[in-house]
Image (cartoon, coloured by chain):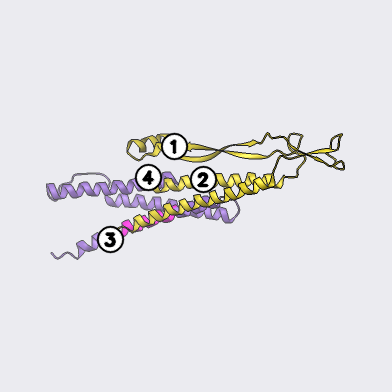
Chain colours: A purple, B yellow
């Protein structure tokens, strides 16, 4: 769980850093200059989505195991669901921000 | 993530207190058991808590080097369940099949009152850990509210 969510947060952080460097290069070096090849924001988002999904699947599995009596770890199950909930909320927030930015650009008069 | 780290540490506290509760329940249940597993009466058990590094050491040191302070964090773990070596209580009860030649029976070295007090302490410690976990969650939720 910690590994999944740890790398998830790391990726969000990396995404934000990439956005920062890109924004810097755009404002400094002018548009159209490709400063960084490889992973795009969409790739990062996709990966993060997969990991949020993995956290949710894990929480779901633990809930199932608890209700079928396979495990008696009430607090660990609750912890997994809480962590899944938090990762999901973070993902939703990132999505809201990205959509907001997109809409702002779409509404920009040309 | 540090929020999840706090949650993991609280979770280790919850697990440790739950195990302690199990041990105390066993003590209470066996307060009258004259036949333990080593011949004599049942002996009181207690847990030994130990502070252990959280997760992977390499990860922790890397975090520490990056200013995360991970290597200093310790979660709690039950490392041992030891038998209390106090002498058994001797009760005069000649009718008991486990009585010795003088009519004395060796009863477990368990004080029910002490066990009850320990159980209250375990319950409260569990509650404290659960509260800490909830507070970590509240902090994370507040952080997510930034800029909403």
- Would you say the residues marked 1 and 2 are in contact, meaning their CB atoms lie under 8 Å apart? no
Q: Chain of mark 1?
A: B
Dominant SS of magenta comes to helix
> Residue B64, image x and y in percent?
36, 37
Whether B60 is among the magenta residues is no
Q: Which residue is mark 1?
A: B56
Give the CA distance from mark 1 to mark 3: 37 Å
SS class, disc 4: helix
Q: Quadrant of residue A98?
A: bottom left
> Residue B20, image x and y in percent?
60, 44
- Would you say the residues marked 3 and 2 are in contact, meaning their CB atoms lie under 8 Å apart? no
Give the CA distance from mark 1 to mark 2: 18 Å
- Observer-side mark, 4 or 1, equals 1
- Observer-side mark, 3 or 2, equals 2
Residue at left offset 16%, top offset 50%: A26
Return the mark for residue A4: none
Residue at left offset 53%, top offset 55%: A63
User: Counting residues from the N terminus, which is met first, the one under dot 1 or under dot 2?
Assistant: 2
Q: Chain of mark 3?
A: A
SS class, disc 2: helix
- Observer-side mark, 1 or 2, equals 2
Q: Quadrant of the C terminus of chain A?
A: bottom left
Q: Which residue is mark 3?
A: A99
Q: Which residue is mark 4?
A: A7
Q: Chain of mark 4?
A: A
Whether A94 is among the magenta residues is yes
Give the CA distance from mark 4 to mark 2: 24 Å
Q: Write the start and end of the magenta stretch as one range.
A: A83-98
Q: Which residue is mark 2?
A: B13
Question: Position of B30 compared to A83: left or right?
Answer: right
SS class, disc 1: loop
């Amino acid at each position: 769980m910690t590994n999944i969510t740890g790398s998830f947060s790391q990726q969000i952080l990396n995404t934000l850093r990439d956005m920062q460097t890109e924004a810097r290069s755009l404002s400094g070096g002018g548009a159209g200059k490709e400063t960084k090849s490889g992973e795009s924001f969409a790739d990062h988002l996709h990966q993060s989505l997969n990991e949020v999904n993995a956290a949710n699947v894990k929480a779901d599995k633990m809930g199932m195991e608890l209700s079928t009596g396979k495990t008696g770890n009430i607090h660990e199950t609750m912890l997994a669901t809480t962590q899944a909930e938090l990762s999901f909320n973070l993902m939703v927030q990132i999505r809201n921000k990205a959509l907001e930015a997109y809409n702002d650009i779409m509404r920009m008069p040309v | 993530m540090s929020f999840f780290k706090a949650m993991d540490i609280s979770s280790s506290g919850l697990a440790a207190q739950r195990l302690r509760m199990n041990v105390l329940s066993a003590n209470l249940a066996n307060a009258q058991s004259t036949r333990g597993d080593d011949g004599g009466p049942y002996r009181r058990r207690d847990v030994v808590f130990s502070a252990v590094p959280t997760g992977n050491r390499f990860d922790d040191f890397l975090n520490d080097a990056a200013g995360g302070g991970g290597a200093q964090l310790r979660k709690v773990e039950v490392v041992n369940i030891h038998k209390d070596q106090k002498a058994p209580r001797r009760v005069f009860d000649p009718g008991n099949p486990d009585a010795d030649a003088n009519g004395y029976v060796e009863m477990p070295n368990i004080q029910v009152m002490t066990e009850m007090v320990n159980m209250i302490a375990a319950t409260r410690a569990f509650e404290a850990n659960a509260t800490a976990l909830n507070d970590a969650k509240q902090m994370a939720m507040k952080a997510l509210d930034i800029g909403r």
